[in-house]
Image (spheres, grey):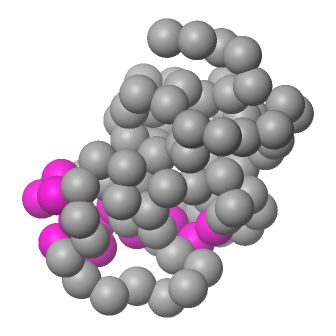
Amino acid sequence: MSTENNPYIIVQDRNGGEMANFEGNKDESLCTQAQDAGAPVPMSCGVGACRTCVAKVISGMEFIDREAVGPQMIDTEDDEVLTCICGIKEEVRPGAEICIRCENL
Ligand code: FES
């Protein structure tokens, strides 16, 4: 698990309160990383089909691979991601930052 050029991740609850901040990795979904960092992002199906884990991307959408883990089965808004299946793109610039606001957190 390389830490070079990995983005910094900020996870907010639905009200914008900061629940976790950490250096992300490119191996796991954002949901799993957030949970490991102490933000209890709710997850149900785990395969991009139910919206339980949905988050609005406040910043850094360009660094997110929406389907890093698997295909998205339901529609979301352009500024939303399903955190159980999205991850960090392989190519990100140093110092990049991603901020997500979890709808059900
Ligand atoms: S937990 Fe169902 S879409 Fe992520």
Which one is nearer the viewer's eye here, 22 or 78?
A: 78
Residue 100 to residue 56: above or below? above
Q: Quadrant of the C terminus?
A: bottom left
Q: Is residue 65 left or right of residue 21?
A: left
Number of callouts in the render? 0
Quarter of the image holding residue 3? top right
Q: Is residue 9 left or right of residue 103?
A: right
Question: Would residue 14 be seen by someone viewing this image from the given angle?
Answer: no
Residue 48 to residue 63: above or below? below
Main SS of the magenta part reads loop
Q: Position of residue 15 (x, y in %)?
A: 65, 67
Q: Which residues are magenta?
A: 45-57
Q: Position of residue 35 (x, y in %)?
A: 41, 33
Residue at point 72% right, 40% down?
Answer: 92
Residue at point 54% right, 26% down?
Answer: 25
Which one is nearer the viewer's eye here, 89 or 77?
A: 89
Does the magenta run of residues contain 47?
A: yes
Quarter of the image holding residue 71? bottom left
Question: Would residue 62 be seen by someone viewing this image from the given angle?
Answer: yes
Residue 53 to residue 43: above or below? below
Residue 16 to residue 12: above or below? below
Does the magenta run of residues contain 103?
A: no
Q: Position of residue 40 (x, y in %)?
A: 40, 41
Quarter of the image holding residue 73? bottom left
The outermost residue toward the left is 45
Which one is nearer the viewer's eye here, 41 or 80?
A: 80
Q: Is residue 23 left or right of residue 31?
A: right
Q: Position of residue 27 (x, y in %)?
A: 41, 28
